[in-house]
């Protein structure tokens, strides 16, 4: 997500950080590079021009030019302005019961899936949502919503497949809803390949009848400039109250996100970062600005981990590792915890500075098949072997290799890496000391939040040791203790480079 923009911004800011004195000339050069980066990322031209003008005005200030670290000052100005461009503060839904939420957008943007994702999230927050299928045009749209509703366990109203009157469907759905426990109703509407008069008129009539508290446009982040025009058209038709960006995981540019908020004045309220129903969350402008600038999103990582990971189990594994009892069963449990958080690349991209590290990783380093191969090796072991790796003599290793379809070399390397990690994490060295400090900090309770990773790294000597090819699963899973905490320093990411480095 935003990889193209992030890379070009990083190049522009590197030039500013590399000069001893900031002048009007090199500020102009940097702003020109940044403007081109925004345009290449599909940011609307007038939005890019006005944004650069505002940043340049502040960057030329005397306070910045005479500061000790003017390059960093300009990066901060850019980050704050970018967060403001994206909407400032996170925008919440108006859910005054009984709330009516109208979901609109073009075909292919993901309206039906997004409706189900939104229902799932509202349910998890303690609400009682209902779903209504109002897409009477697209074949199988009603069945698709019914299937998704069953998966998220939310009641759904499905009209007769022969029904063609959207207003009649809405009336019948409201009568049906009276008999259901609910505090909000989500209406999934029809779309087209492009905005046309028939679609606009249908949505205008439906919005007039329902008078929804929320009219949310589902927009594909990869559609670029077209998304801005679509947003303006839908706003004129139904009076949008917000935007949901989808497919952010597959778009390298992402300029639509920067443009739509500025052009329409409507907040981006949610974003989807994958096909799975749990890959959906609130759009927080400040955190998104940090991600675009390669600063990561530790709060997002903690929230994701806290939702998916059993803290007691994670802490138990850390304790076992410190005491030297950590075995392949613990490793397998932690690996599955990590897999529950979603694709490894998306997870690591939430770490500050990882975008730079990822450029130096070998091809396929983040391929989920690698974790599957490690899992297959462990599952090919007997219970006794998983509990005690010392039983793995050459003949047993050959049997394991045949059982999992891996080479003996892969099995031997995996077992050696496991042994090295076990000794490193439970030993008296830097990593062992960091683990003990982490246990001490996390043991204070989830209410205290996440351990201060920056101080842990400093306590370990300011640098995390290289862990070769073995994933530091404990460190990642151990982040699931709650919210808050200080942001780790980029220098501590050495371990994560080591996760995937090829052994020479």
Image: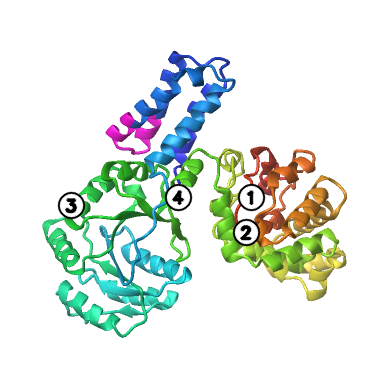
Would you identify the image quadrant in which residue 320 lies? Answer: bottom right
- N-term-proximal mark, 3 vs 4: 3
Residue depicted at 29% across the width and 33% down the height? 45
Element type where label 4 sits in the image = loop
Q: Nearer the viewer, residue 184 or 259?
A: 184
Image vertical order of residue 153 relative to residue 422, above or below: below
**Residue that mark 1 sits on:** 485
**Residue that mark 4 sits on:** 284
Image vertical order of residue 347 relative to residue 142, above or below: above
Q: Position of residue 172 (x, y in %)?
A: 21, 80
The Cα–Cα distance between marks 3 and 4, rounded to whole angstroms, is: 25 Å
Would you identify the image quadrant in which residue 156 lies? Answer: bottom left
The Cα–Cα distance between marks 3 and 1, rounded to whole angstroms, is: 43 Å
Q: Position of residue 339 (x, y in %)?
A: 60, 62
The Cα–Cα distance between marks 1 and 4, rounded to whole angstroms, is: 18 Å
Q: Are marks 3 and 1 in contact (CB under 8 Å)?
A: no
The Cα–Cα distance between marks 2 and 4, rounded to whole angstroms, is: 18 Å
Q: Position of residue 94 (x, y in %)?
A: 34, 61
Q: How is the image coloured?
A: rainbow
Total marks shown come to 4
- N-term-proximal mark, 3 vs 1: 3
Would you identify the image quadrant in which residue 343 lies? Answer: bottom right
- N-term-proximal mark, 2 vs 4: 4
* Range of residues picked out in magenta: 35-50
**Residue that mark 2 sits on:** 482
Mark number for residue 236?
3
């Amino acid at each position: 997500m935003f990889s193209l923009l992030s890379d070009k911004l990083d190049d522009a800011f590197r030039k500013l950080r590399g000069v001893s004195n900031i002048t009007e000339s090199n500020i102009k050069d940097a702003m020109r590079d940044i403007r081109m980066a925004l345009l290449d990322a599909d940011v609307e031209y007038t939005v890019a021009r006005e944004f650069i003008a505002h940043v340049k005005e502040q960057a030329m200030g005397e306070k910045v030019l005479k500061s000790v670290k003017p390059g960093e000052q300009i990066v901060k100005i850019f980050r704050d302005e970018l967060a403001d461009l994206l909407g400032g503060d996170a925008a919440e839904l108006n859910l005054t019961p009984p709330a009516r939420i109208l979901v609109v957008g073009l075909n292919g943007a993901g309206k039906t899936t997004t409706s189900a994702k939104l229902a799932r999230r509202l349910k998890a927050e303690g609400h009682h949502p209902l779903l209504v299928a109002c897409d009477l045009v697209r074949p199988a749209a009603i069945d698709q919503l019914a299937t998704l509703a069953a998966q998220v366990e939310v009641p759904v109203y499905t009209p007769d497949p022969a029904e063609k009157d959207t207003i009649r469907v809405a009336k019948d759905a409201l009568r049906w809803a009276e008999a259901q426990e609910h505090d909000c109703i989500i209406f999934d509407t029809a779309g087209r390949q492009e905005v046309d008069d028939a679609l606009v008129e249908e949505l205008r009539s439906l919005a007039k009848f329902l008078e929804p508290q929320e009219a949310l446009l589902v927009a594909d982040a990869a559609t670029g400039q077209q998304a801005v025009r679509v947003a303006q058209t839908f706003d004129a038709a139904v009076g949008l109250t917000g935007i949901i960006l989808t497919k952010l995981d597959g778009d390298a540019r992402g300029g639509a996100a920067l443009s739509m908020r500025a052009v329409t004045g409507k907040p981006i309220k949610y974003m989807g970062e994958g096909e799975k129903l749990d890959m959906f969350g609130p759009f927080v402008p400040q955190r998104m600005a940090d991600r675009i600038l390669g600063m990561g999103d530790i709060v997002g990582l903690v929230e994701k981990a806290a939702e998916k990971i059993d803290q007691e189990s994670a802490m138990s594994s850390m304790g076992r590792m410190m005491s030297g009892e950590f075995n392949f069963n613990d490793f397998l449990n932690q690996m599955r915890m990590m897999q529950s958080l979603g694709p490894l690349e998306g997870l690591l991209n939430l770490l500050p500075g990882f975008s730079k590290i990822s450029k130096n990783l070998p091809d396929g380093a983040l391929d989920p098949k690698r974790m599957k191969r490690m899992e297959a090796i462990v599952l090919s072991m007997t219970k006794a072997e998983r509990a005690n790796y010392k039983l793995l003599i050459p003949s047993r290793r050959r049997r394991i290799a045949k059982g999992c379809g891996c080479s003996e070399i892969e099995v031997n390397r995996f077992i050696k890496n496991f042994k090295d990690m076990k000794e490193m994490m439970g030993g008296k060295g830097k990593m062992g000391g960091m683990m003990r400090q982490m246990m001490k900090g996390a043991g204070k309770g989830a209410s205290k939040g996440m351990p201060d990773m920056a101080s842990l790294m400093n306590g370990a000597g300011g640098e995390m040791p290289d862990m070769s090819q073995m994933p530091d699963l404990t460190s990642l899973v151990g982040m699931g203790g709650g919210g808050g905490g200080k942001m780790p320093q980029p220098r501590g990411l050495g371990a994560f480079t080591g996760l995937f480095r090829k052994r020479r």
